[in-house]
Amino acid sequence: MGGYLDMELLRFTTAGSVDDGKSTLIGRLLYDSKSIFEDQLEQVKQTSEKRGATEVDLALLTDGLKDEREQGITIDVAYRYFATPKRKFIIADTPGHIQYTRNMVTGASTANAALILIDARNGVIEQTCRHSIIASLLQIPHLIVCVNKMDLVDFSEERYNQIKVDFEDFASKLDVKDVRFIPISALKGDNVVNRSNQMSWYEGSTLLYTLENLHIGSDHNHIDCRFPVQTVIRPQTKEFHDYRGYAGRIAGGVFKPGDEITVLPSGFTSKVKSIDTFEGSVDEAFAPMSVTLTLEDDIDISRGDMIVRTNNQPKPQRDIEVMLCWLNSKGPQPRAKYAIRHTTADAKAMFKEIRYKMDINTLHRNEDDKNITANDICRALLRTTRPLLVDSYKKNRNTGSIILVDEGTNETVAAGMII
């Protein structure tokens, strides 16, 4: 089990306000860890020269959209992949503008870690608080606070310590378990991949070392067994004439052949006969592996059903309390029916009540203003047409999240965390 988890993928999201140097930081990570191609570098050099820059502008490595290159800002969520001998990484680079909160929610929903960038000259600002609150709402297990542009404050230890105290003071109100601080200069490369000669007072690790060594094995819930069925596999070939497997991605827990299981919502019980993967059969499987289970008994199972351990089951619920990040310019319509998607199950849902709107900067609950528009975060009570097999988001980020879709336009209007 160790080997697979060690080379696991670490997904991290980056957040900061507009000019905090996020794109430069990612460029620096890719550049110094030798994760970019010569032709990409050549293209970036040419663009930098055209602009009259003296150094290669590493931010151009990440700003893929033409609009952004011209304006020098990041608009959409840009995913970047890189690997070092220790680990594989996916970076969701999300924009800093307030109107793009939705992108941050999209980029962060599966992340193991969030990088929060602070400009050493400006310290903790409203955007810092906003991004940290979203990271804590989304239950991102690890926060790495990068105090950037240290070169512009003469690598001052006092300045760094002050920012650290300010952030810790604010973060004490949040639900975050693991916060680390690193003073960096993305432009010059200090403490990103290589240790800084300028900040001998800093005893901690570089950013890359921290990312490579974050312990993420326990970020998944390995206690509550949840297997939402995506599809039923019946090959109908001579050699697999009687094969019937249930394929999907494990959302929690560890499954082994011989385990007593229950299929929900039907309540039928059976035992796991085998666990098959693309590479062959395995004797245990855990989140987030994609596998095919076969069972001892012939049970009628279809997409949207969930296989769980008999003595540990989620509660089927039709009234669901959620924290919603509203993504659409048109707010929630009373009595309108939305399609609700939860793991592999689909149903319809309507709003029973909007409890309050949350002020993202202060965490204040506003119960008087329930006018919800794009990027607002609110708490609401939904009623679904059929029971969904839910856990709280705190317990399991896979079985604790939903999305709402407007069936008329097929747009995703909200992402929600079940309370």
Image (cartoon, rainbow, N blue to C red):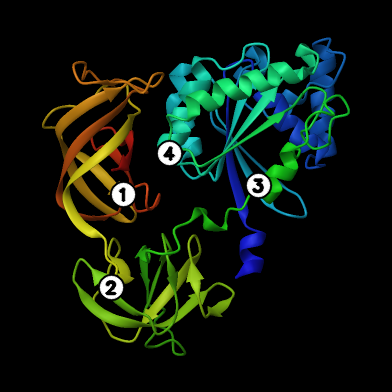
Image height check: is 247 above or below 390?
below
Q: Can residue 75 be seen in this view?
A: no
Q: Name the residue under label 2.
A: 311
Disc 3: CA contacts within 10 A as few (<14), some (14-19) or many (>=20): some
The answer to whether the residues at label 3 and label 2 have Cβ atoms under 8 Å apart is no
Mark 4 or mark 2, earlier in chain? 4
Q: According to the image, label 3 marks what residue?
A: 89
Disc 4 from disc 2: Cα separation: 28 Å
Q: Is mark 2 on a helix, strand or loop?
A: loop
Residue under pointer 4: 138
Q: Which of marks 3 and 4 is in front?
A: 4
Left or right of 211? Residue 52 is right
CB-based contact (under 8 Å), mark 1 and mark 4: no
Residue at point 61%, 17% (across, down): 73
- Residues at marks 1 and 2 touching, judged by CB atoms closer than 8 Å: no
Check disc 1 and report its element: helix, strand or loop. Answer: loop
Q: Nearer the viewer, residue 343 or 259?
A: 259
Calculate the distance from the C-alpha at mark 1 to the C-alpha at mark 2. Answer: 18 Å
Tell me which numbered mark, 1 or 3, is placed earlier along the sequence.
3
Determine whether the residue tagged by mark 4 lies in a helix, strand or loop.
loop
Where residue 162 appears, x then y in whole percent? 64, 18
